[in-house]
Structures are given as structure tokens and as C-alpha cells.
């Protein structure tokens, strides 16, 4: 029940080493010593990130009131997601003195995040106004030859000048495939970034099963080709 120091900011962690723990115990008249010089205490404060999409969406409304050209959206530069307390209420995003340089399409705004139960956060925002389109991107960094699941792909608004030709616009096209190479999070994907996930290899020995009314027949077969999930596979009965 005795405060011994300030808490970490939401989403951050502190490590107190043995010497610091000894000092805290001594300052509070506690007869305690670390069991070894390697003893440490890790303090983590849970936090909730404010996403880029949320900030860009609120900023688009704010900048739109300045009479910007139609079809342009804000793209943040060097954005670090702010973190509020995990138990905080619904955050409100407020913007102070937003400004746009139309010839260069650069913008600036000072954002304040206010949420019940969390200290206010102020963050300066810069970026540019660009035409954007929704494309499929990895939600995390993917290793080479990793099977892509539904949670690994999402649609994201990306500036059109950073979208490659034939970028994938339907995440379902990528689910179940394998990454051909390491893929960075939030980078637009093309079909060449993945290969079908082969679940049966050519020359594999398989079991055939035929079931009809009261009759079950099994036999062995050899695959004549590679096959992915859902494909029709040609086999030879051996």
C-alpha cells in the first residue's frame, strides 16, 4: 500500500535490479535483501495502442474541413502508435492547428488523445496527402515458407504510388498459400510473393477409401502430381 515510485507509462516496462530493490527496501524500513545479485523485478503496465488507421481516419475528417481536393487522404510519416492505459475509456482524438501546404501536399497537425482513466497524450503528426487504395498486406512479418492464415492478412489503405502492379486486393486469395520469401508487415502483396501450399507431393503413397452401402474398400495409390488443398488429384492404384 506504500507508493515507492512512479509507474511506467502505458505499454512500457521497467526492470529494477537487485541494488535498486535493496534501496527501496531500506528506504521503507523493510528487513529484506535480494537472494542474489541477479535478482530483479519486472514491472509491466498494460496498454492499448491507438492504430494508424484510427488516427488517419480522424485526421481525414479534420483536414477535409479545410477544403482539400477530393480523392486525397492523409498518409502519416514516421508514425509511432501512441499507447493509452488498457483500462481507459473510449479515446477522443483532438487536433490543434492543422495546416496543409497544397503545392507540396504536406500537412502538419498536433494531436491530443483524451481518454477517461488515462493521462492526455500529445503527439505531432506530419505526412502527405495522397490518393489511396485498399490492398492486401501482412499483419505481421512473415518468414519464408510460412503458411498464411486468415489472421496474417488484412486490407489496408495504401498510397497508390507505393502499390505494385497486380497487387492483391482480396485477402482470401492468399490464405493457405506459403510465403515465397520473407514478407514485411504492412507491405502490399502480389501473387508472386506466395506459392501454393502443396499438401501432397508427387509419388507420395496414399490410402484410397471407397464406402458404399455396407461395403468399405481400401487400397494404396501413388500420387502422379503435387496437389494443394481442394485440388483434384490424379493417382495410380498400386
Image (tube, grey):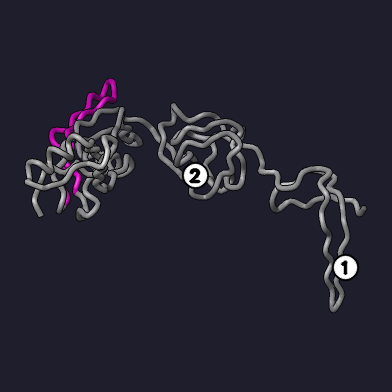
- Identify the residue at image location x=19%, y=34%: 19
For marks 2 and 1 on the same chain, the one whose residue lies earlier in the sequence: 2
In percent of width and height, residue 31 lies at: 12, 47
The nearer-to-camera label among 2 and 1 is 1
* Residue density around tag 1, few if under 14, some if 14–19, many if 20 or more, within 10 Å: few
SS for callout 1: strand
Q: Mark 2 points at which residue?
A: 153
In percent of width and height, residue 32 lies at: 16, 46
In percent of width and height, residue 106 lies at: 27, 25
The tally of labels here is: 2
Quarter of the figure with the N terminus? bottom left
What segment is highlighted magenta in the picture?
92-115
SS for callout 2: strand
Residue in the foreground of this view, choosing between 26 and 63 = 26
The answer to whether residue 132 is magenta is no
- Identify the residue at image location x=23%, y=31%: 125
Q: Name the residue under label 1.
A: 217
The answer to whether residue 93 is magenta is yes
In percent of width and height, residue 82 lies at: 25, 39
Amino acid at each position: 500500500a506504500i507508493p515507492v515510485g512512479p509507474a511506467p507509462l502505458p505499454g512500457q516496462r521497467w526492470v529494477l535490479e537487485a541494488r535498486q530493490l535493496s534501496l527501496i527496501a531500506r528506504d521503507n524500513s523493510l528487513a529484506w535483501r535480494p537472494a542474489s545479485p541477479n535478482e530483479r523485478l519486472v514491472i509491466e503496465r498494460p496498454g492499448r495502442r491507438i492504430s494508424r488507421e484510427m488516427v488517419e481516419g480522424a485526421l481525414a475528417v479534420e483536414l477535409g474541413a479545410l477544403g482539400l481536393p477530393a480523392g486525397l487522404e492523409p498518409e502519416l510519416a514516421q508514425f509511432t502508435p501512441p499507447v493509452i492505459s488498457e483500462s481507459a475509456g473510449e479515446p477522443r482524438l483532438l487536433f490543434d492547428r492543422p495546416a496543409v501546404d497544397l503545392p507540396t501536399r504536406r500537412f502538419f497537425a498536433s494531436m491530443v488523445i483524451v481518454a477517461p482513466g488515462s493521462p492526455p497524450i500529445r503527439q505531432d503528426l506530419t505526412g502527405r496527402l495522397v490518393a489511396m487504395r485498399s490492398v492486401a498486406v501482412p499483419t505481421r512479418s512473415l518468414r519464408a515458407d510460412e503458411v498464411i492464415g486468415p489472421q496474417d492478412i488484412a486490407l489496408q489503405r495504401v498510397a497508390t504510388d507505393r502499390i505494385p502492379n497486380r497487387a492483391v486486393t482480396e485477402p482470401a486469395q492468399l490464405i493457405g498459400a506459403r510465403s515465397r520469401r520473407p514478407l514485411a508487415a504492412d507491405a502490399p502483396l502480389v501473387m508472386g510473393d506466395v506459392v501454393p501450399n502443396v499438401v501432397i507431393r508427387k509419388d507420395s503413397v496414399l490410402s484410397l477409401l471407397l464406402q458404399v452401402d455396407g461395403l468399405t474398400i481400401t487400397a494404396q495409390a501413388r500420387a502422379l502430381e503435387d496437389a494443394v488443398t481442394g485440388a483434384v488429384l490424379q493417382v495410380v492404384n498400386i
